[in-house]
Image: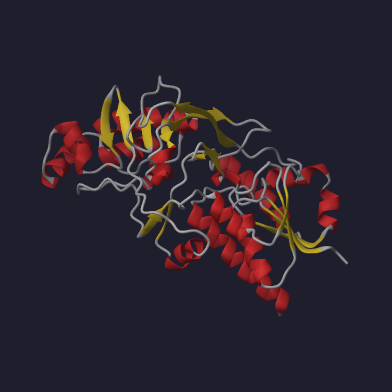
């Protein structure tokens, strides 16, 4: 008899959500993680009363009332609204692109003027079916916005020329003809009061967790501990890279504590010029309307991913998607292993999406276990 019903590899949002649902159903779970903390990339470090997002800015947003109620059952969320600012050559522009941005660029004051200006810029481009990110962005907003606010930032972020990136990456970017700086359109948005660790701790309450524990060090042993395995790590790593590595973009973070009350006046400021090596500066206290006499900022540098580095953004181009399908075919033959989460599924997930995916898969799995 195995000691646990489920051994869950990874204490990120998918693993912790699945574990919580399994425990509610009377199942005994073990969660392991190679890091020294729970929470995966939403982990926050308390630096003199400021919850520092150690792995980059995380803003929770969703239109799904059930998921919003679910996360708020563990910790109350504040009213934080994501309203980033872009810095280009020392001038500031509101994001996402809206009437404030258009006024800052061109001095226009009405939606009609802004629409006419963009239409005028797009007309001479003759782009009907965009073939890459650059063409998609130009067709969407024209050359002024593209050159100042998209091109440099995007090419830094992905480490490729915009002409080599797929068009779909930019399609989700909001463009509004209203004076609305709220980046997301979702009905529900906020940050957990006291940081994301409270959410992770709530999800794992009463569940055994072993940190600094690498599944890859003894796969057979960890599998033997449970009737089933829930794996949230990289799918190619699970299969020892037999079809080759799936590619990612990585990030590097440089955290600094400053003896001043307010450094930049906003939680997130993007730097869009290609010669500036970082993509943005995060000032963490603004996520929770902090009043501490000091502040903590983080420079976020994009990086080329290599094995052993943290994978952040999947490179979902044709080559990598084809390779992922080969790994998926292998995973479908695994009788007692459930794969889930952004790494195992090789896709970008917002937080509400990964929670939603975990809830659905847990429901399917636990219902099947009963019937």
Q: Position of residue 298 (x, y in %)?
A: 47, 31
Q: Position of residue 178 (x, y in %)?
A: 20, 49
The N terminus sits in image quarter: bottom right
Q: Quadrant of residue 212?
A: top right
Q: Quadrant of residue 145?
A: top left
Q: Is residue 335 visible?
A: no
Q: In this picture, is 238 found above or below 64?
A: above
Residue ID at (60%, 53%): 341
Front residue of this view, candidates 67 and 99: 67
Q: Position of residue 344 (x, y in %)?
A: 64, 50
Check the image and name the residue furthest to the top: 275
Q: How is the image coloured?
A: secondary structure
Q: Is residue 203 visible?
A: yes
Check the image and name the residue furthest to the right: 1
Q: In this picture, is 87 found above or below 24?
A: above
The C terminus sits in image quarter: bottom right
Count the labels in the image: 0
Q: Position of residue 273 (x, y in %)?
A: 36, 24
Q: Quadrant of residue 201?
A: bottom right
Residue ID at (40%, 33%): 293
Q: In this picture, is 13 found above or below 167?
A: below
Residue ID at (16%, 37%): 103
| Drawn side of residue 229 relative to residue 85, left or right | right
Q: In this picture, is 67 found above or below 107?
A: below
Front residue of this view, candidates 254 and 311: 254
| Drawn side of residue 240 relative to residue 120, left or right | right
Check the image and name the residue furthest to the bottom: 371
Front residue of this view, candidates 141 and 231: 231
């Amino acid at each position: 008899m195995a000691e646990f019903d489920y051994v869950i590899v990874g204490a990120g949002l998918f693993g912790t959500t699945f574990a919580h649902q399994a425990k509610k159903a009377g199942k005994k779970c073990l969660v392991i993680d190679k890091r020294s903390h729970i929470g995966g990339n939403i982990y926050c470090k308390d630096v003199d009363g400021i919850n520092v997002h150690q792995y980059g800015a995380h803003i929770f947003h969703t239109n799904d009332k059930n998921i919003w109620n679910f996360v708020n059952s563990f910790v109350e969320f504040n009213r934080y609204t994501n309203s980033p600012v872009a810095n280009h050559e020392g001038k500031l522009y509101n994001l996402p692109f809206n009437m404030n941005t258009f006024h800052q660029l061109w001095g226009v004051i009405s939606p009609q003027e802004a629409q006419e200006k963009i239409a005028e810029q797009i007309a001479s481009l003759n782009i009907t079916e965009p073939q890459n990110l650059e063409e998609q962005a130009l067709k969407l907003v024209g050359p002024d916005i593209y050159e100042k606010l998209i091109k440099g930032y995007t090419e830094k972020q992905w480490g490729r020329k915009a002409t080599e990136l797929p068009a779909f990456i930019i399609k989700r970017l909001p463009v509004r003809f209203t004076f609305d700086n709220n980046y997301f359109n979702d009905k529900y948005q906020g940050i957990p009061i006291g940081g994301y660790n409270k959410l992770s701790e709530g999800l794992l309450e009463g569940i055994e967790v072993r940190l600094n524990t690498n599944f890859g060090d003894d796969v057979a042993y960890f599998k033997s501990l449970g009737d089933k395995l829930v794996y949230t790590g990289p799918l190619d790593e699970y299969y020892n890279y037999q079809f080759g590595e799936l590619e990612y973009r990585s990030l590097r973070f440089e955290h600094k504590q400053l003896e001043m009350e307010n450094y930049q006046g906003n939680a997130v400021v993007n730097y869009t010029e290609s010669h500036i090596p970082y993509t943005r500066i995060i000032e963490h206290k603004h996520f929770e309307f902090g009043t501490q006499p000091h502040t903590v900022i983080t420079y976020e540098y994009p990086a080329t991913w290599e094995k052993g580095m943290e994978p952040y953004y999947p490179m979902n181009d044709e080559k990598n998607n084809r390779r992922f399908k080969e790994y998926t075919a292998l995973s479908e033959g695994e009788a007692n292993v459930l794969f889930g989460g952004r790494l195992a599924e090789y896709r970008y997930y917002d937080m509400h999406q990964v929670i939603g995916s975990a809830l659905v898969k847990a429901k399917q799995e636990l219902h099947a276990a009963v019937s």
